[in-house]
Structures are given as C-alpha cells and as structure tokens.
Image (tube, coloured by chain):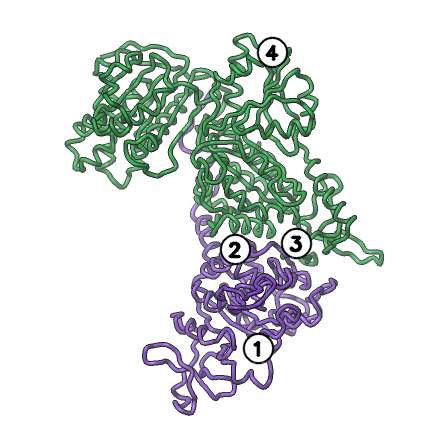
C-alpha cells in the first residue's frame, strides 16, 4: 500500500526514553542514515549523568534530538516536530518543548498506573484530553516487538530490549530513510550473537511494516538532500573529530602523539578513540589522576613527543600547576578542555562555556596560555590542528576549549584531503646556539627565535645540548636559575609578548547587506544557534552582523577595529559573561552580554528575539 | 674508548653507550651548589657523580627529574639533561618521558615530603606500574626548604614549628609503603656511607623496572642527627641489620640475627643461642613480598634499633615502558596506518 508523500524542508525529531532504552543508539542510527541520504543535519544528545537512573523517572530520561533539512542548518533545532516517548517520564520531561500540532509517538505499554504515578500524572495524558492539540500516535511498542520476536530463541527481556529498533524502523519508514546502513551496523554490532542480530533486524523490519500498514499514519514524509559543496562526506561528532584532528596533527608534525589522561565526562571518548589508533604511533596513558595525566604528557613533550592531555573543567583545576610549569618550561602541550556545567561536579553531561576565564587566568603568576575554541562538531578537527600548530611553533601549552554540545553533537563533514592539511613540521635543536666571548660554542636553552620568541626545543639524547630547566625563574638566554629583579620583569614580559605575538587569522564578519549597526559576537559552540538566530532576525528585517572568535588568546589583531564599527555589540554566551568581560577590559567596548547557563545550547528563536530587540533599540 | 666496565645493566640496554672516558667531573655543572654547608645532599651528589661513569652511558641520554624541596635541586648540579618540576609530580613527569623514550636512563630525585606527602599518589602508581625509573628518595624526616615542619616520616610527637606540642601523625615507613605498592625493587642506604651508597645505586641501576632507593640523609639545620645512631661508630654496628642476598641477616656486629617465629613473624635473637645456621638467609629475589615487608617492620622509628640497610626486594616482572612500547609496535606491525582512510571511515557519501 503506498501512502501519500509530503515534502518537508526540515524536521526535528526527539527520541526520549529511559537511560537503558537505547535512545542514543536509535538516534545515532537515524542520524547516520540521514547523513548518508544527503541532508544537512545537527544533533543534540541529552542524557543523565547516572548510568542507569531509577527506571521510569524524570531524572532518568535520556534524549537524542536530530534536526535535518534540505538546506544549510547550524543547530539541533528549538522545538521538535516529532517526539518519540518511550514512557510517561519521557513524555512529561519533553512535552513542554513541543509546539502545538507536533507528532507524539508513545509506547502505550509503559503507560501503566504505576509508571504514571511515578512521574506525577493523576490520569493518563493519553486519555484525559490534555494532548488533544497534538497528533498522538499511541502504539504498544514493547508488546508489538515481543510479538514480532516470539519465533526467536531469546528471552522476553531480550525481546523487549529490541523495542528501540522497532521505533527506529517506524521512524525510518515515516521519513523515507535508507535501511541498508542500519542493517550493516546491526550485523557488525551483533556479529557474535546471531540470534540477537536476527531479532533486532526483525524488530526493525516490524517497525517499518507497521508504518506501512497502520492507518494511524496516513502520510510519509520526505526531506530532500541539502545542497552542499562537492566532495566526499561523512557524519562526525565533535569528540571524534577532535581525536582525528590530533592524530592528523601528529602525522603532519611527524611527532608521535602521546595522550596522558584521566577519565572524565564528557572528554573520555577522546581517550577511548585515541587508544584505538596505536598503529599511527599514538600512545595513550590512563594515569592515576588528572595531575599525572598532564604530568606524563609534559614529560613526553620534553622528550620530543606531541604531548596532549584531555579533560573537563574539574580536571583543568587540578592540572593548573602543571600548566604553569609548562608555561615556565616553554614546552609544547595541548590541553583539551571539554567544558561541562560547573562549578565543582556541576552538570557532568550538560554543556556550558564557563571555563573561559579559568583557561585564560587560572594559574599563579603571569602565565599566559593561548586558547583555541571549535565552533561546531566538525570544526573540532581543524581546531585541533590549529592548537597543535600554536603549541609546537611557539613552544607553549595551548588550551583547546570544546564543550559538551560540540563534543557529543554531530554534523556532516567534508572529509579533508590529507595532503592538503597544513604542514606542521618542527625542528628540534641540534647544535649550540651561542658563542662565548672566548669563542667556545654553547647551548642556551632560553635563547629565543627573534620572530616567534620561541625557545629551542632540545630533546634529551641530543649530544652537546645537555641542560637543565625548571619552574624556578630562569635567566634570559642561559636558562640558569635567576632571582634577579630585572631579569624576572624581563622574562614575564617576554613570555607575555610571545603569546601576544602569535599570528592568528583576522576575525571575519558575516553581514550580507553590509549595513548592519549591531554585531553579534560569539565564541565556541554557540556559533550554530547565533548563526541561525541572525538569519531569523534578518528575515524579519533586522540589520545584524555576526562574528565568531576561534582564537580567544590572543584575539585576532583586527578584533578591536571590528567591534568599533558597530553601534552595539551583543555577546551571547553559556556563562555569565566571560567573553564580555574580556572584550570590555581589552577594547573598552560596552558590549551587551546575553547569558544562559541551562546546560543546553541557546534556542535560536529566543536569541533572535533578543537580537531584534537590540537592533530596534539602536 | 671508554675504560669503564660494561656491567651490562639490563635496564639500560636501549640506552646508547658513551664513546668517551667519563669521570665524576664530567657530571658536575658550572652552577653553584646551594645546599646549606654540611647538608647530607653533598655526599649523595658526590656519590652519584662518581658512580655515573660506571654506567658507561652517553651523558646526553641521562635525565634527572625532580619535584620540589631541597633534594629536588639535584638536577641543576648534574651535567646531563634535567628538569626541576613541581611538588610531588616528578614520578608522573618522569613516567611520561621514560615510557616514550626507552633510549633514556631516567632518574628521579625526591624527598620525604615530596614523595610521600604531596606526591604519594604518583609514587605508589609509578611503583605498581614498574616504569623503568630509578627513584632516589632522600629521607631526612623533616621539611627543610619550608624551614622545619614535620614530615610524613617524622617520628610521632616530634616538636617542630608547626607542631609545638608534638606531631600527632604516625609516620610512613617508606620501604613498607613501597613494598605494599607492589614495588619490584626497594632498597635503603645512608648518605654518609659512600661504599654502601654506591653498591645500592649499582643494584638499582641493574634492576629492570622502578627502583626505589631510600637514602637516610641528614638535614643539619632542621633535624640534625636524625640518623646519628646509625652513623656513629659506637652504636651503628649494633643497630644496623645488613641485608645481603644469600647471607644470614644479622646486625653488623653479628651479635643478633633474624629468625622466623613460630607464628611466622620475624624475631631478633642472640645468634649464639640459636646458631648462625638458623638465622634467616636473605633472599632479595623472592617473589612473595611478605618477608621483605616483615623485614621493613623490624626497625624502631624512635630508637632506630634493628634498622635494615641494603636491598629488601629485587624481583623481575613486566616493565611498563617495555609493554607500553610493545603494544604500539604490535599495532604498527598489524596494519598500515592510512590517515586518509581513517578520516573517511566506512560510511560516506559523495556530493557532486
């Protein structure tokens, strides 16, 4: 039976269920198929910190949102058109985000009086009329899955577990998604469990067939592929792109990659990923704590490796002293901070941008550290290469400030051609660099390159360059211990000048009409929502320009000039105004901060409203 | 060519050998040594500098890494590569260096505060991993650089600036701690006994894996005479148990020896009363660490009676940096590393 096919420009689907319901997996698979179909897309996984929070409760709800379209999009979307709610908790936790008329697919098997009571529903929302402005599709997902799998030699529990595949099959039918990739994925995942594999495939197919046959769904939807620049694409998450960026940088620098790390959400996936790639010479070390993680990485850098440590905000706090040592030693080191909600343990699985000032200033003494921030999941790849370029060129620790949103979110990525990646080759010192008055040659570990102010990187094992370095202040040039007042003043200023002098690309402004009087300035993962909101505001006639900082230390050289071009500068951030503080202090520009710390990315529509208000006030 | 004897230090087999004759002088730097006059560190520095040529290693392949404290100034005075790092973290930094550079001989210098207080975590994990590091722990039972507070090895009741009514802390026994942390090599020696110090350094250098050497060191400013009973000629022989592999464990004067009691614990008894043949013979290579641990418990932390000196434990087990590098080598041998295909993955699509 063929049903009517309706064309849509874009769709936002949210899968929601218990932590153990497999919603992330279903979402991932739907995303992969959508990516290979050629839609532009953006995802937002949103899951609890607990591995298995109490079943059926609101804190235990795990969700995955996918926005896909036939045009360029930059956010995971504000309001879902479709909610898949696997239980009453998932419905209750998400209903407030749905616009009237949205489709809700509910698993009626879970709407028992016990489960309803657990989340505070006095009556079933499926029956009390409270959902009448939505298109509700009540489906006994669990029992239909069990029914479809009764011929298999598996337990009832195993059969019930396949209900996410039933849901995925139904959604795949509803949105015309290709199925082959999902089947391939299942075959790989359950290669060693043929019975479970067959059951999952059967559940997926049962969901698909249900869509085809049921009268509940009268139409099927189609979202055409989006026009994208020619090339080969894949879908990629931020953490994966960041890990690949580090491997690529190591190859381009011809320095073995060494990761010293301690597990922490949401950064651990980078450790997991890099651990798989030893054949690229990648060495990973799970240390006893955050401090040892960075310490070992610094030791490896000293030995001529590309030393990297990965962590989140609480880990950065522990690593601060070692970062200061790296500043003093002037050795390359990359510190990846995948930011999460703070302070303290905060919101481990939610996103935030509140480590900017920690990265900027969180050390004793004058200890400047360059900061690079990716703007989207795929951009993590390029940002990693850039962080490595700065670290190795200027012999300095560098912060790579990602966050939970870009780390776990995903988007299509045009796969770069390896040979076109920047050449990051570095040279170790191999000979004395100073001649004494009596003509003897010697090695000065702190004699700087006149252009970059970088000191030589002389690795142990290099004959004739034996030298000692340490955290105590060093005499300019020789590197010997020095407590001299003038020397310290000079060294502090030299270290600062080195960082200030890092060459970074100019700040680019997007202002389609060229006559905007308001600039929206952001950094990091807010790029997508800011971009979407600026487009919305422009559609409504607001003249607004957008600029986004990748380099937060040093700022691009033209930043001040760009800021002064506009009557007003709005700075949206997922913190209480950290970039705004820096911008005000540095450029004396009275920027207008707009701040949210909700653990979630900005909603584009809300932000568009803020922007329009500012434009109207000019 | 070098005249040093190649002892074939197995732990240093990947470290390039020197092609010039070395002497203690070659390991001295032009930096003024800034320990207090009379500090025990001078004796250790001189001992190490005169021992180094024996290793026959290329000087540029030797690295000294330290934390913070008086002892941690050591690298500045060794004409090799060196890093004076931050408080307690030297084992972590040295681990990262040693596991990535098997061609280096990596030595750590630390003190009782650096290694056992702020750096306790890194020390125990380095020991259990068995990274190829030689850790010299200078134990003077006091904080010197911060001017005289009690340390984690200070005896209970010690009156210091921060403990005017006496310290409440029960001290660590560094040897017991190391054995409990799965150390494969643990030894103890004394700063003023050059011969024993050199023997102990040699044994440590021969060992494959982490070697912890506790060196009783005198701080003549803040804790002068802490180890005097073990140094002064009138008492030392009746207080010190000399551990030598394959020999009965007795006090240096031979009067008393170690026997195993009926319930398994160790006793110190008159040798004459039991006969020397019944005195426990030291086996440093015993896989089971319980006897080495029991030996470490014999000494009295106040009177220093029955203090064992020498190598408590020296066993072979997997060395972390070797297995670490072996995994990388296995992975490299197992397939070509094609970055382009890694980036592409298996699920791609083409847009024309």
Can residue A209 be seen here? Answer: no
Residue for badge 4: A617
Between the C-alphas of marks 3 and 4, the distance is: 55 Å
Q: Quadrant of residue A165?
A: top left
Residue for badge 1: B196
Q: Colour of chain B?
A: purple
Task: Nearest to the eye among marks 1 and 4: give it.
Answer: 4
Instruction: Give the mark, 1 or 2, whose residue is nearer the N terminus.
Output: 2
Between the C-alphas of marks 2 and 3, the distance is: 21 Å
Asked whether the beta carbons under mark 4 and mark 2 sit within 8 Å of each other, the answer is no
Task: Nearest to the eye among marks 1 and 2: give it.
Answer: 1
Residue A314 in percent (x, y) is at 50, 42
Q: Residues within 10 Å of mark 3 (few under 14, many from 20)?
A: many
Residue for badge 2: B99
Can residue A551 be seen here? Answer: yes
Between the C-alphas of marks 3 and 1, the distance is: 31 Å
């Amino acid at each position: 039976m063929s049903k009517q096919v309706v064309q849509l420009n874009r769709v936002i689907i949210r899968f929601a269920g218990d932590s153990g319901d497999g919603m992330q997996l279903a979402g991932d698979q739907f995303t992969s198929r959508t990516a290979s179909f050629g839609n532009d897309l953006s995802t937002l996984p949103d899951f609890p910190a607990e591995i298995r929070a109490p079943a059926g409760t609101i804190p235990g709800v795990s969700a995955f949102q996918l926005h896909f379209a036939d045009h360029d999009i930059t956010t995971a979307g504000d309001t879902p058109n479709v909610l898949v709610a696997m239980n009453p908790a998932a419905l209750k936790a998400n209903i407030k985000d749905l616009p009237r008329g949205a489709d809700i697919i509910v698993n009626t098997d879970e709407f028992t009086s016990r489960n309803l009571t657990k989340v505070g529903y006095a009556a079933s929302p499926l029956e009390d009329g409270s959902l009448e402005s939505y298109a509700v599709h009540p489906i006994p997902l669990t029992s239909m899955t069990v029914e479809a799998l009764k011929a298999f030699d598996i337990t009832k529990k195993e059969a019930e577990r396949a209900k996410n595949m039933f849901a995925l099959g139904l959604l795949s039918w509803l949105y015309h998604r290709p199925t082959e990739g999902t089947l391939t994925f299942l075959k790989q995942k359950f290669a060693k469990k043929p019975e479970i594999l067959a059951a999952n495939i059967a559940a997926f197919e049962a969901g698909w067939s249900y869509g085809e046959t049921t009268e509940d769904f009268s139409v099927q939807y189609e979202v055409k592929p989006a026009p994208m620049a020619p090339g080969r694409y894949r879908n990629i998450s931020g953490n994966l792109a960041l890990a690949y960026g580090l491997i690529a940088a190591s190859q381009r620098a011809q320095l073995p990659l060494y990761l010293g790390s301690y597990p922490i959400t949401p950064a651990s996936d980078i450790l997991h990923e890099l651990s798989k790639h030893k054949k690229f010479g990648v060495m990973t070390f799970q240390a006893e704590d955050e401090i040892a993680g960075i310490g070992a990485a610094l030791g490896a850098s000293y030995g001529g490796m590309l030393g990297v440590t990965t962590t989140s905000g609480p880990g950065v706090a522990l690593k601060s002293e070692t970062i200061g040592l790296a500043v003093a030693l002037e050795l390359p080191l990359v510190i990846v901070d995948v930011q999460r909600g703070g302070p303290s343990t905060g919101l481990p699985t939610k996103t935030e941008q509140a480590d900017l000032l920690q990265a900027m200033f969180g050390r004793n003494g004058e200890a400047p550290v360059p900061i690079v921030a990716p703007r989207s999941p795929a951009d993590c790849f390029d940002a990693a290469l850039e962080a490595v370029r700065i670290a190795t060129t200027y012999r300095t620790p560098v912060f790579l400030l990602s966050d939970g949103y870009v780390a776990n979110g995903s988007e299509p990525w045009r796969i770069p051609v390896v040979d076109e990646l920047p050449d990051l080759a570095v040279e170790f010192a191999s000979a004395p660099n100073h001649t004494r008055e009596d003509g003897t040659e010697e090695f000065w570990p702190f004699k700087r390159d006149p252009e970059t102010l970088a000191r030589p990187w002389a690795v142990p094992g290099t004959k004739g360059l034996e030298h000692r370095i340490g955290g105590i202040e060093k005499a300019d040039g020789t590197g010997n211990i020095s407590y001299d007042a003038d020397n310290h003043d000079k060294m502090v200023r030299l270290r600062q000048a080195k960082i200030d002098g890092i060459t970074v690309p100019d700040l680019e402004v997007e202002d389609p009409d060229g006559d905007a009087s308001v600039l929206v300035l952001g950094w990091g993962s807010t790029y997508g929502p800011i971009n979407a909101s600026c487009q919305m505001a422009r559609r409504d006639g607001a003249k607004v320009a957008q600029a986004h900082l990748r380099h937060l230390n040093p700022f691009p050289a033209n930043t001040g000039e760009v800021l002064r071009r506009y009557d007003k500068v709005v700075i949206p951030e997922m913190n209480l105004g950290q970039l705004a503080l820096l911008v005000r202090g540095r450029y004396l520009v009275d920027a207008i901060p707009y701040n949210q710390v909700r653990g979630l990315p900005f909603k584009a529509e809300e932000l568009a409203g803020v922007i329009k208000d500012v434009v109207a006030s000019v | 060519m070098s005249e040093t004897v190649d002892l074939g230090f197995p732990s240093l087999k990947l470290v390039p050998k020197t092609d010039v004759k070395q002497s203690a002088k070659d390991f001295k730097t032009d930096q003024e040594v800034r320990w207090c006059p009379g500090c025990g560190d001078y004796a250790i520095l001189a001992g190490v500098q005169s021992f180094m040529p024996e290793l026959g290693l290329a000087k540029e392949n030797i690295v000294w890494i330290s934390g913070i404290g008086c002892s941690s100034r050591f690298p500045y005075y060794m004409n090799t590569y060196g890093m004076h790092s931050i408080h307690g973290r030297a084992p972590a930094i040295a681990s990262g260096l040693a596991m990535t550079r098997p061609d280096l001989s990596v030595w750590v210098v630390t003190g009782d505060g650096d290694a056992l207080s702020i750096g306790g975590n890194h020390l125990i994990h380095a020991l259990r991993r068995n990274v190829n590091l030689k850790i010299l722990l200078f134990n003077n039972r006091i904080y010197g650089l911060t001017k005289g507070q009690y340390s984690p090895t200070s005896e209970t009741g010690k009156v210091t600036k921060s403990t005017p009514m006496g310290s409440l802390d029960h001290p660590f026994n560094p040897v017991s701690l190391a054995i409990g942390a799965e150390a494969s090599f643990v030894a103890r020696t004394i700063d003023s006994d050059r011969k024993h110090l050199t023997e102990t350094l040699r044994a440590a250098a021969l060992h494959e894996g982490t070697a912890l050497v506790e060196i009783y060191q005198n701080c003549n400013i803040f804790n002068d005479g802490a180890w005097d009973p073990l140094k002064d000629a009138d008492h030392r022989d009746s207080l010190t148990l000399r551990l030598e592999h394959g020999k009965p464990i007795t006090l240096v004067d031979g009067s008393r020896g170690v026997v195993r009691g009926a319930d398994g614990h160790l006793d110190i008894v008159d040798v004459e009363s039991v006969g020397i043949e019944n005195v426990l013979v030291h086996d440093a290579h015993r896989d089971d660490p319980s006897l080495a641990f029991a030996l470490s418990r014999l000494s009295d932390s106040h009177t220093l009676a029955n203090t064992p000196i020498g190598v408590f434990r020296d066993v072979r087990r997997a060395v972390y940096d070797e297995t670490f590098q072996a995994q990388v080598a296995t992975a490299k041998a197992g397939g070509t590393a094609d970055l382009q295909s890694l980036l592409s993955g298996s699920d791609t699509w083409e847009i024309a």
